[in-house]
Amino acid sequence: MDQLWLGYDDLSVHCAGVMAILYYRPALDARISASFGRVPRNVRAVVFMADGTMLPSSRDAEQLRRSLAAWRLGRS
């Protein structure tokens, strides 16, 4: 698993490019829109990527962090 599924159809990212996983706040809407084109319903977390994009996720931030941590442990 080197892809992290963000909970929306066809929206996944390479784990290696994930810099941070943030809890969603409406203050991030402009950055999400600039990166993704819109702010979808049910956003629960925001994935900050190495290239500066901020992508929405309908998955819980802690769930995403656990998946990313498992990927990182498997690579070490």
Image (tube, rainbow, N blue to C red):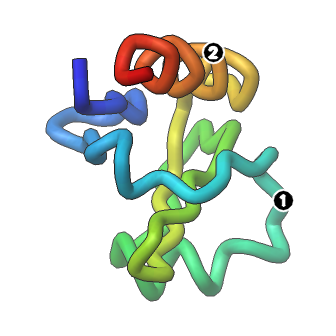
Give whichever of discs 1 and 2 has the lower sequence position.
Answer: 1
Residue picked out by circle 2: 66
Report whether 76 appears left or right of 12.
Answer: right
Which amino acid does the dot numbered 1 rest on? Answer: Arg
Q: Is residue 45 above or below residue 25?
A: above
Numbered badge on residue 50:
none
In the image, 33 versus 63, the foreground residue is 63
Q: Which residue corresponds to the image point at 29% horizontal and 46% vertical from the top-left?
A: 13
In the image, 51 versus 72, the foreground residue is 72
Q: Residue furthest front?
A: 76
Q: Which residue corresponds to the image point at 63% horizontal and 15% vertical from the top-left?
A: 66
In the image, 26 versus 72, the foreground residue is 72
Which amino acid does the dot numbered 2 rest on? Answer: Arg
Circle 1: element type: loop
Q: Which is closer to the viewer, label 1 or label 2?
A: 2
* Image quadrant in which the C terminus is located: top left
Residue picked out by circle 1: 25
Q: Position of residue 32 (x, y in %)?
A: 54, 72
Q: Position of residue 26 (x, y in %)?
A: 81, 66
